[in-house]
């Protein structure tokens, strides 16, 4: 117990919302606005549920009442309670024993009985209270009702004061109300316990050391354990080994930053198999409470549907076509690269420098084409990392017009038929422009370079799933139609049009990846695409994109390309590909960076701890050892929240979370890329 008048450490003022659910009044505003961080109760948002319920009920009481909580008997009282003591303006946050020091000899024994778990109503003899020198004394009866926390331990008591100077009838009336109020408190506590006992969701409380303190009956029923077998057990022993790193990162974020992200993980059943749960958690400063929904059946059903869909789509013709087309294209590109390097080596050995630049240009052109080929394949497979952002669709289409006109050529006409007020969409601008360029290129060739292409946008509201139950759900979409007046397509060709390397063009004209890239991009963006065509009637490629309700950011002018040198900024470069890491380090060093390199996550984190700080961390997303670049970034930002991160990736089995990319000082680059672009992006991040 803290002695009366003991000073407490000041803490920053926190802005709080209204505490009670009843109509706001002056006392409710005082409680909500009081700086509880200076008391042992801590900031109001971190109060446990049991304390919040007790304060809510106390505030609704029609008679003087206070909640006394914690080892130092910290006070939270209602408006009627303020008139009992000569305190200005109120006794919020004060110690109970200091407030009633003048009558402590009569009050103290009953306080200790309440803290031992015994309710008392002391009415005989009543206690004389002197409010102020000029005020008449009051004769009052005191009630003491113990209050328990989430673990069932007595954490404080409810102090009720009833004036006994009134008539006997009035006294009896107030006493009945006091008893009814105490019954309400008990009923609310019982309802919370009933929720814990009857919930179908698995619930558990965990200590900050990640040991299981308690679990509800649903948890034991789903996982088959007995209470004596798991209480006090480290929770990570029940988590699937592949999920432990993700769980540790999530728990650290919750404990340090109250970041309540949902986590999907597996827990071990008593029989040895694992069940999937989707967990949400909350930390009250003492215990972590986690509520999980068993999603094992949902995941198994999704896996069965995915397997069935995969079996339906596994056609040997497509596999052979994909392998053959990829081999043909890559052989051509590698031949150009290898031949140029061979001639370049001969000229350097002979000491002749003529046509050296021409050989380099041929090799660079082949590399650029190979980069475009891999990007298109990734787009079709829906593993192309995207960076979507809310767009004003018409404005973005108009900005792409110069690129489309160059792709169409001088003798093609481009018509726009755009919706007057199209809904916003969330798309990757670069991939959208590539898709439009591919469609315009196909249209130009279908029209034999003389014809008309029309681009339409229109808002669409789907009342049912489209085109079937397995397609797009009902909702708002923006349709984009690209139509030409060329020779059209036969039905047999439409059925195969989106397959990679399928083409009706003569050999050597087109790789057959344009439409497959469009198909992958639209699907990865949450949309749907199809083709409408007939021989001699032109072709229309139709795309549906989900409506975006997020606000659209103001248009920013692109910064001019810079070749400026760095000023010795420290960079931590993390990539498991040795050769690529070596050339990136050499180029960044030539551009003026001080580069430290690491080949895996553990080495990177060790460098970050011991060799830091670093101005920028450049990390691949796919790293060996089961610890991804995303998790490396999260771990680093737990140590230094403002750490700037540049992600680089050529393939991501899971997309980078939009929440992670939206954080200041974060960017994403897709492999392959130019080394100059890498350095420029690094400088842009450092300039932010």
Image (cartoon, rainbow, N blue to C red):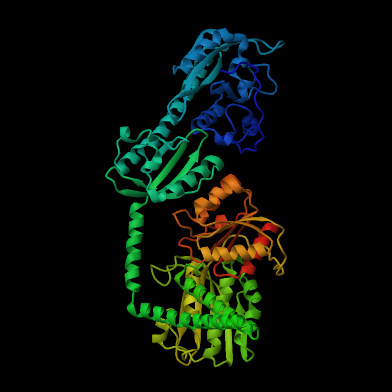
Residue furthest toward the front? 350
Name which quarter of the figure residue 327 lies in: bottom left
Closer to us: 264 or 529: 264
Q: Position of residue 538 (x, y in %)?
A: 50, 88
Q: Is residue 619 above or below residue 210?
A: below
> Looking at the image, which residue is at 65% across and 53% down?
615
Closer to us: 526 or 675: 675
Q: Is residue 649 above or below residue 151?
A: below
**Considering the image in quadrants, where does the C terminus appear?**
bottom right
- The answer to whether residue 31 shows anywhere in this view is yes
Q: Position of residue 264 (x, y in %)?
A: 42, 50
Count numbered badges in the picture: 0
Q: Position of residue 293 (x, y in %)?
A: 39, 47
**Considering the image in quadrants, where does the N terminus appear?**
top right
Q: Judge from the rendering whether residue 562 lies leftward or rightward of residue 183; answer left or right.
A: right
- The answer to whether residue 688 shows anywhere in this view is no
> Looking at the image, which residue is at 50% across and 71% down?
521
Name which quarter of the figure residue 165 lies in: top right
> Looking at the image, which residue is at 50% across and 55% down?
600
Q: Is residue 512 above or below residue 306?
A: below
Q: Judge from the rendering whether residue 462 lies leftward or rightward of residue 421; answer left or right.
A: left
> Looking at the image, which residue is at 61% across and 77% down?
418
Q: Position of residue 610 (x, y in %)?
A: 58, 46
Q: Is residue 588 above or below residue 451?
A: above
């Amino acid at each position: 117990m803290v002695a009366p008048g003991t000073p407490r450490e000041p803490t920053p003022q926190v802005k709080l919302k209204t505490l009670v659910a009843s109509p706001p009044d002056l006392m409710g505003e005082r409680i909500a606005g009081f700086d509880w961080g200076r008391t042992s109760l801590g900031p109001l948002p971190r109060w446990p549920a049991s304390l919040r319920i007790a304060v809510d009920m106390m505030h609704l009481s029609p008679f003087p009442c206070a909640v006394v909580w914690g080892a130092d008997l910290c006070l939270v009282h209602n408006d009627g309670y303020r008139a009992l003591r000569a305190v200005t303006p109120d006794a919020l946050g004060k110690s109970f024993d200091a407030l009633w020091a003048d009558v402590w000899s009569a009050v103290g024994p009953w306080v200790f009985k309440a803290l031992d778990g015994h309710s008392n109503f002391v009415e005989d003899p009543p206690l004389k209270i002197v409010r102020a020198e000029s005020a008449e004394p009051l004769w009052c009866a005191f009630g003491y009702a113990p209050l328990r926390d989430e673990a069932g331990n007595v954490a404080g008591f409810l102090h009720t004061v009833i004036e006994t100077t009134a008539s006997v009838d009035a006294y009896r009336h107030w006493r009945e109300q006091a008893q009814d109020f105490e019954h309400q408190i008990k009923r609310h506590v019982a309802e919370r316990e009933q929720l814990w006992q009857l919930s179908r969701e698995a619930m558990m409380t965990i200590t900050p050391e990640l040991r299981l303190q308690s679990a509800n009956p649903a948890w034991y029923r789903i996982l088959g354990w007995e209470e004596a077998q798991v209480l006090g057990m480290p929770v990570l022993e029940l988590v699937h080994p592949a999920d432990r790193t993700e769980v540790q990162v999530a728990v650290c974020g919750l404990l340090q930053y109250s970041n309540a992200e949902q986590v999907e993980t597996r827990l071990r059943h008593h029989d040895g198999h694992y069940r999937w749960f989707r967990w949400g958690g909350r930390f009250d400063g003492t215990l972590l409470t986690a509520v999980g929904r068993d999603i094992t059946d949902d995941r198994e059903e999704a896996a069965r549907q995915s397997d069935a869909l995969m079996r339906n789509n596994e056609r040997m013709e497509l596999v052979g076509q994909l392998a053959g087309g990829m081999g043909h294209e890559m052989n051509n590109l590698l031949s150009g690269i290898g031949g140029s390097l061979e001639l370049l080596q001969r000229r350097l050995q002979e000491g002749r420098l003529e046509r050296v630049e021409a050989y380099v240009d041929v090799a660079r052109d082949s590399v650029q084409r190979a980069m475009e080929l891999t990007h298109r394949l990734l787009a079709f497979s829906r593993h192309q990392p995207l960076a979507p952002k809310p767009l004003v669709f018409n404005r973005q289409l108009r900005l792409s017009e110069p690129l489309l006109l160059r792709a169409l050529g001088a003798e093609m006409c481009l018509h726009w038929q755009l919706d007057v007020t199209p809904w916003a969409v969330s798309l990757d601008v670069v991939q959208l422009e590539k898709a439009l360029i591919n469609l315009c290129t196909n249209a130009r060739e279908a029209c034999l370079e003389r014809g008309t292409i029309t681009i339409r946008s229109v808002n669409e509201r789907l009342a049912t799933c489209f085109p079937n139950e397995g397609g797009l759900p009902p909702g708002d979409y923006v349709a984009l139609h690209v139509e030409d007046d060329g020779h059209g397509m036969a039905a047999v060709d439409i059925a195969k049009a989106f397959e990679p390397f399928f083409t009706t063009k003569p050999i050597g004209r087109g790789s057959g990846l344009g439409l497959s890239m469009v198909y992958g991009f639209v699907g990865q963006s949450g949309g749907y695409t199809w083709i409408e065509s007939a021989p001699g009637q032109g072709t229309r490629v139709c795309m549906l994109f989900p409506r975006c309700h997020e606000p659209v950011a103001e248009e920013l002018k692109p910064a001019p390309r810079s070749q400026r040198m760095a000023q010795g900024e420290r960079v931590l470069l993390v990539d498991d590909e040795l050769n690529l890491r070596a050339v990136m380090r050499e180029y960044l060093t030539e551009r003026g960076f001080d580069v430290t390199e690491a080949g895996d996550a553990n080495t990177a984190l060790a460098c970050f701890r011991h060799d830091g700080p670093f101005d920028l961390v450049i990390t691949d997303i796919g790293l060996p050892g089961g610890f991804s670049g995303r998790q490396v970034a999260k771990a680093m930002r737990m140590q230094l929240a403002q750490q700037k991160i540049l992600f680089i990736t050529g393939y991501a089995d899971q997309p980078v979370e939009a929440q992670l990319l939206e954080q200041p000082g974060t960017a994403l680059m897709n492999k392959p890329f130019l080394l100059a672009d890498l350095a420029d992006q690094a400088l842009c991040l450092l300039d932010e």
